[in-house]
Structures are given as C-alpha cells and as structure tokens.
Image (cartoon, helix red, strand yellow):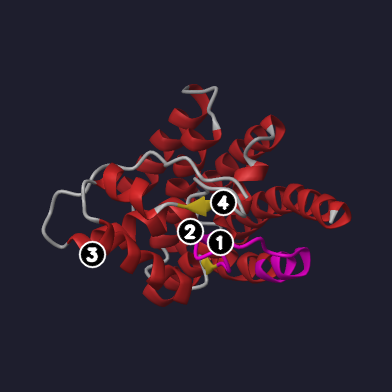
C-alpha cells in the first residue's frame, strides 16, 4: 500500500478545529483525492492543516465509523478497497438516489443556481487539461450543485454518504480522458433538461454520466481481482 499524497485542501484557522478537520478530510475522500488502498498519515495531515495530531486522529476514527477508512493490523489507517460486487450495488443505489435528486432539481432549481452551474461547466470545458486532483473537485461541485437544488436534505445526506465510499474509485475513472469528455457532454444534457424543466431527461443525463464512470471502475476492479 502506498502512503497517500495530501490533497489540495486549505489549512484550518478557526477554533472548531475538530469539526473542520473531519469535514476537510471527509470532503477530500469523497472528492476522489485519494486512491483505494492509500495509507493516511496523521502527522502529514496535522502539519498540512496547521493543527495538532489529536483532531486528525479523532477525524480518522470518525471516518472509520462511517466506513470511509479502515484500521489495519499494522496500526495504520487507510482507505479500503471495495470489491466489485459491492461497488456495483452502490452504483445501483446511486443511479436511483442521484437520478431522483436531478429529477426534483429540474423543477426546483432557481435561475441563479442554473447560471452558476453553467459557469462551472464552461470552466470545466475550457480550463483544462485537468488532472485528477483538479477535475474531480469540480465534478463533485457540479453534481452536488444539482442535488442541493432538490431541496431534500435527507436525499443529499444519503448521496453524500455513498460518495464517501465510492469517491476514491472515481480517481481511476477520471484518469481516462475519454470519460472526462463524455462527462462534460452529460453535464450539458443535464443543464439543458433542467432549463427545460424536464425532470425525466435530467435524471437520464445524470444516470448516464454515473454509469459511464462506473463501467470504467468495474474494469479496474475486475483486473485487480484477477491479479490477486
């Protein structure tokens, strides 16, 4: 297992360090800034965030409880490697939850929210070429910009929990230039559907986007299982 390089996250300055540290590490995992199997270092995170190691350890323990990290026999903490069957199950759940959120957003998103997503999409399309560490946070920002417009806190929490599990696997799919290009196409389709207030088309665009990325991940997982 390799020791992960730290993601592009800003230091912690405010007093509620424990909550901030947990949130920043959680977001970086869900955002695909690490790979499955990576080992995380409390010392490196503490230095990078400008805090002691205690809030980092507490954040790691919370993330173990949430299923995002795992304790290992050698007393290290890292990201689990999800097996293909579990990933396929999580993907099926994603299609339903995220498709529903997109469908609801199509009728509830404001003009300002839609304009912000248009600007973000333009940035993704014209600001590259993106590496994994730059593209994935923008991709996540786009998706959750849609999901927040569903106005369903419960739905958003469920989606965020699943992204925490599958985020590291998205690191693999984002390395495929073809997937990034196709993803931008699906993003445009989703925005057009939302602008037309067409919930069914918005759902389809988001689900198609998720499925293309999932297909690439399944290929990687199958190859890993054959290698073992």
What stretch of residues is rendered in magenta?
72-90
Q: Residue 19 sits in which quadrant?
A: bottom left
Can residue 109 be seen?
no
Q: Secondary structure at mark 1?
A: helix
Residue that label 2 marks = 106
Q: Earlier in the sequence, mark 1 or mark 4?
A: 4
Residue at left 67%, top 43%? 173
> Callout 2 environment at 10 Å: few (<14), some (14 to 19), or many (20+)?
many
Residue that label 3 marks = 18
Q: Earlier in the sequence, mark 2 or mark 4?
A: 4
The x, y position of residue 192, in whole percent, is 54, 44
Residue that label 4 marks = 38
Residue 200 or residue 117, whichever sits in front: 117
Label 2 and label 4: CA atoms lie apart by 37 Å
Q: Earlier in the sequence, mark 2 or mark 1?
A: 2
The x, y position of residue 58, in whole percent, is 32, 68
> Callout 1 environment at 10 Å: few (<14), some (14 to 19), or many (20+)?
many
Label at residue 199? 1
């Amino acid at each position: 297992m390799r020791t992960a390089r730290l993601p592009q996250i800003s230091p912690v300055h405010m007093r509620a360090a424990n909550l901030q540290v947990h949130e920043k590490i959680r977001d970086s995992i869900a955002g695909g800034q690490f790979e499955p199997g990576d080992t995380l270092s409390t010392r490196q995170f503490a230095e990078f965030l400008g805090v002691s190691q205690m809030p980092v350890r507490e954040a790691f323990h919370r993330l173990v409880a949430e299923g995002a990290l795992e304790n290992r026999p050698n007393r290290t903490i890292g990201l689990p490697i999800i097996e293909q069957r579990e990933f396929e199950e999580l993907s099926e759940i994603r299609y339903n939850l995220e498709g529903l959120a997109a469908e609801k957003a199509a009728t509830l998103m404001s003009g300002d929210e839609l304009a912000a997503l248009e600007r973000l999409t333009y940035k993704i399309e014209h600001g590259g070429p993106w590496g994994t560490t730059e593209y994935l946070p923008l991709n996540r920002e786009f998706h959750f910009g849609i999901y927040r417009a569903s106005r369903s806190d419960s739905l958003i929490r469920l989606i965020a929990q699943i992204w925490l599990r599958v985020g590291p696997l998205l690191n693999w799919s984002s390395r495929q230039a073809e997937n990034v290009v196709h993803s931008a196409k699906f993003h445009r389709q989703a925005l057009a559907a939302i602008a037309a207030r067409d919930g069914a088309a918005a759902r389809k665009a988001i689900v198609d986007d998720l499925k293309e990325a999932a297909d690439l991940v399944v290929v990687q997982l199958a190859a890993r299982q054959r290698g073992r």
